[in-house]
Amino acid sequence: MTSDDPDSTLAQLGAAVDAAIPRALRRAWEQHVAHEPVLVARQGIYSAHGRPFAYQFSYRAPGHHPEVARTWGRADHERATDHVLRATFGRADLEHVAHGRLLFVRCPRAHLLGELPIPARPDRLVVEVSTNADVDAAALAGLRRLREEGFRIALPAFADRPEQRRLLPYVDFVKVDVRDLDVEGHPVVRVARSFGAMLVAEYVESPDVLRHARDLGFTLFQGNLIERAGVLDRAGARLVGN
């Protein structure tokens, strides 16, 4: 039997391939996957009272070092984001790692535009705009769509650049590297909060930096002084839908 529907043809081909895989080989692969680590990094974002407000989730893999990401291309960042989203929202025990809090995940352009999917969890997922995402009409339209769907948006590494200022009307959180605010701190902070966003002090690495961030009016804090990123293995958590 033939079909003119390409989707139907592909589905039939996929079913034929699955049927051709020996049961023993399929079982061995499932056992391998079950024992393969599914790693993510988690770092807390804390309130001025020292309580966890949210968590930042980022990519990890066996042998991976975060510095390697500096050499990645577009496809690498997209695959890493898909991994993080599946490892967190694609597992049944989300609250085991989220504890009822918001989860920040940095998303590249393809996720902002809807070319790659994000979980339908606007109640928990904060979409953080990738620092290398082009700020054009399509990106702004994508942010508007995400906000209409109920998602919160975060803008990281704010340094008052023109392209960043274009994003301010669309974001709920602005993250600022407070190590760079020793001279131009107050003007940058004023611009960052000009549309009412909550401010997050990033890279709080020393007590002096923390005091300076407090003096500048920050109310949320993230950095190794407060909490270092820990690595979680999600392999033992049941996949959603299984």
Image (cartoon, rainbow, N blue to C red):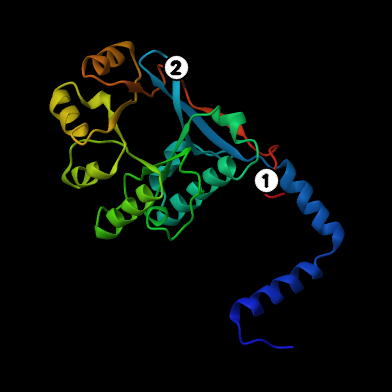
Question: Which residue lies under the disc numbered 1?
Answer: 239
Question: Which residue lies under the disc numbered 2?
Answer: 51
**Horizontal relation, residue 90 to residue 181: left or right:** right
Residue 126 drawn at (x, y percent) = 42, 39
**Horizontal relation, residue 93 to residue 124: left or right:** right
User: Vertically, is 121 above or below 145?
Assistant: above
Q: Amino acid at mark 2?
A: Arg
> In this orientation, which residue lies closer to the viewer: 130 or 35?
130
Cα–Cα gap, marks 2 and 1: 30 Å
N-terminal label among 2 and 1:
2
Q: Residues within 10 Å of mark 1 (few under 14, many from 20)?
A: some
User: Vertically, is 145 above or below 193?
Assistant: below
The residue that appears at 40% across and 57% down in the rendered structure is 110
**Horizontal relation, residue 78 to residue 237: left or right:** left
Rendered image: mark on residue 72: none
> In this orientation, which residue lies closer to the viewer: 59 or 125?
125
